[in-house]
Amino acid sequence: MRLFSNRRLIFVLLGLLWMELSLLPLFAVGRVQPDFFLIFLAFYAFRVSWKRIVTLSFFVGLLRDLVTNSFFGLETASCVGGAILLRFLALEFDREKRSVQLVSLFAFSWVTLLLFVLFSFLVGERYLFEEGIFVNMFLTVIYTSGFGWLLFPLLEKWLKPALQMRQYELF
């Protein structure tokens, strides 16, 4: 499968899984935590390939469904729904500008969390709907975007040798 052909991207994805499972409480501010997988998906869409982002988000959502205790399929559906927006943003706007990347990460995170809450409501999980859930979601999106501002340059620096395109001469 060409989606996972780059070894460095696989190591980054496994590293993010490890960070989500073990280091995430260290970065938490109250109940607000950054979402490293959404940062990775936004980076992948803007710096690697916007064409395969929906497929990758399906696998990332499936991975998140396996490690969380929510209704199975909610993470996958919300990641894929947000990735459709992310694909549109990566296609329509300048993928090289950091400001466009961060605003797109903000929009992608917000839509993904809203879809998760909507799908949770549709399947009947009532525990999510408490006071301040939208404020908590908004703070999570802002916190994730802030971490994206820090992690995008690190991901680009570490993955840059793997991302360089070969140039071919025409004549």
Image: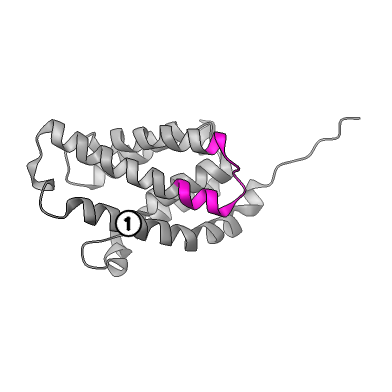
**What secondary structure is marked by label 1?**
helix
Give the magenta-colored segment's residue range.
90-104
Residue extending farthest to the right is 171
Could you say where residue 161 lies in the image, as x and y percent from the top left? 66, 53
- Verify whether residue 93 appears in magenta: yes
Assess disc 1: are there few (<14), some (14-19) or many (≥20) residues with their C-alpha within 10 Å of its C-alpha: some
Q: Is residue 34 above or below residue 128?
A: below
- Classified by dominant secondary structure, the portion drawn in magenta counts as helix
Residue ID at (35%, 33%): 81
Front residue of 115 and 40: 115
Residue at 10% x, 51% y is: 130
Q: Quadrant of residue 120?
A: top left
Q: Is residue 6 visible?
A: no
Front one among 124 and 158: 124
The structure residue drawn at horizontal position 32% and vertical position 39%, both measured from the top left corner, is 61
The residue identified by callout 1 is: 20
x and y, in percent, of residue 96 in the image: 62, 48
In the rendered image of this protein, does residue 142 appear above or below residue 10?
Answer: below
In the rendered image, residue 133, in percent from the top left (x then y), is placed at 18, 52
